[in-house]
Structures are given as structure tokens and as C-alpha cells.
């Protein structure tokens, strides 16, 4: 049973095959999404960490809303509840944000970092007010947190860092920060 109104939770993460320290944390987070009656909005891929998250949400009874992209169409998950294919990465990010009530960033590479920084830039400029949480599994985002604190301290952020993004140490805390 959901502890709050059902949400569409957008998750940005890697499509790479990763170490169990990351996959176990992602699966735990995904299962909580599904158990609480929320839906996953994700990049639609059926590989790597994206697959782990989709599997976890689906196994726990949650809905899957995939937003794939034309050049990755053959990697899209076949049994998603809904699958949208965007023309390019920019359209994909816009569609993911549009369909989301909240955003959680899991571990990832340059694509995930691109998604996260664009979402934060849009939030900084008031283009959306959706909560953004970085799930800092195994301290993965410690360096980014330090860099962002320096940006805030040296006047590069026009709003307080805490109004822009929050960092969670585990799955439970990430959902609590979303009110989910």
C-alpha cells in the first residue's frame, strides 16, 4: 500500500553493467518504488542498471513508463507498461521531466551527469519545481556534492543548494526526501 499519493518517479542512471554495490542499492530503491504504488519513468533501456531498476519496480508491482530514443530503440524493454520513443536525447530528457513528479539520480556516467545537470539547470531557473535527489550510493557523488557546495559558497548558484538538490545516502532516505 502506498504511503502517499502515487507518483511518477523519474530515475536517471547508467545502462552499463555495474558492481553489486550499485546494483543492490538500485534494486532496493526500485522495490520501494513499486511496493509504494509509484511508477518508474526511466530511459526505457533493458540493460545494465536501467534493467535492474525496471525489474525491481515491476517485480514489486509498480508501473514502467519508458522514454527511449530512436538510436537506442533496439535496447528498449519489451514489456514496459508504456514506451515512448523520442527523436533524440534532448527530446527524451524533456519528455522524462514532463512525465515525472520527482527525479532521482542514481550512479551513472556522462549521460547520467548530463541529464542531472540539465534538470538542475532548469530547476535553478524556475522552469520546474520538482524535487531532485541524488542517491549517493557508496559515496559515488561525494565529489559532486563538494563541487556544488563550492559553487554555492563562491556565489555561482543564485539559490541555496538545498533548494536545488538533496543528497540521499540510501533508498529509504531518497523516498523520504520526495515525500514518497
Image: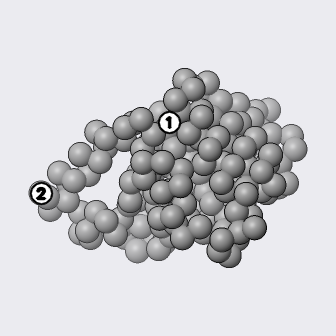
User: Horizontal and vertical percent for residue 14?
Assistant: 57, 35
Mark 1 and mark 2 residues within 8 Å of each other at the beta carbon: no
107 shown above or below 118: above
Which label sits on residue 64? none
Going 54% across and 60% down the picture, which residue do you hit? 175
Q: In this view, does 122 lie to the left or right of 161?
A: right
Render colour scheme: one colour
Instruction: Name the residue beneath numbered marker 2.
Output: 154
What is the spatial separation of the Cα atoms under label 1 and label 2, in whole angstroms? 27 Å
Q: In this view, does 151 lie to the left or right of 33?
A: left
Q: Quadrant of residue 78?
A: top right
User: Horizontal and vertical percent for residue 16?
Assistant: 60, 27
Circle 1 packing at 10 Å, graded few (<14), some (14-19), many (20+), is: many
Q: Is mark 1 on a helix, strand or loop?
A: loop
User: Horizontal and vertical percent for residue 171?
Assistant: 54, 50
Q: Is residue 100 left or right of residue 125?
A: right
Circle 2 packing at 10 Å, graded few (<14), some (14-19), many (20+), is: few
Q: What element carries label 2?
A: loop
79 shown above or below 81: above
Q: In which quarter of the image is the N terminus?
A: bottom right
Residue 87 visible? The answer is no
Going 66% across and 48% down the picture, which residue do you hit? 30
Which label sits on residue 108? 1
User: Horizontal and vertical percent for residue 70?
Assistant: 73, 41
Amino acid at each position: 500500500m502506498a504511503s502517499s499519493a502515487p507518483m511518477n518517479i523519474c530515475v536517471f542512471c547508467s545502462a552499463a553493467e555495474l558492481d553489486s554495490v550499485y546494483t543492490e542499492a538500485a534494486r532496493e530503491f526500485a522495490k520501494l518504488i513499486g511496493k509504494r504504488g509509484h511508477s518508474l519513468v526511466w530511459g526505457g533501456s533493458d540493460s545494465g542498471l536501467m534493467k535492474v531498476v525496471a525489474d525491481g519496480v515491476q517485480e514489486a508491482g509498480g508501473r514502467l513508463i519508458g522514454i527511449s530514443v530512436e538510436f537506442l530503440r533496439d535496447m528498449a524493454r519489451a514489456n514496459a507498461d508504456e514506451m515512448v520513443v523520442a527523436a533524440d536525447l534532448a527530446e527524451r530528457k524533456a519528455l522524462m521531466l514532463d512525465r515525472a513528479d520527482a527525479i532521482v539520480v542514481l550512479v551513472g556516467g556522462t549521460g547520467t551527469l548530463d541529464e542531472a545537470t540539465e534538470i538542475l539547470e532548469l530547476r535553478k531557473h524556475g522552469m520546474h519545481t520538482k524535487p531532485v535527489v541524488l542517491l549517493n550510493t557508496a559515496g559515488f557523488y561525494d565529489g559532486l556534492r563538494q563541487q556544488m557546495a563550492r559553487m554555492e559558497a563562491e556565489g555561482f548558484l543564485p539559490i541555496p543548494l538545498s533548494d536545488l538538490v538533496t543528497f540521499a545516502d540510501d533508498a529509504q532516505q531518497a523516498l523520504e526526501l520526495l515525500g514518497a
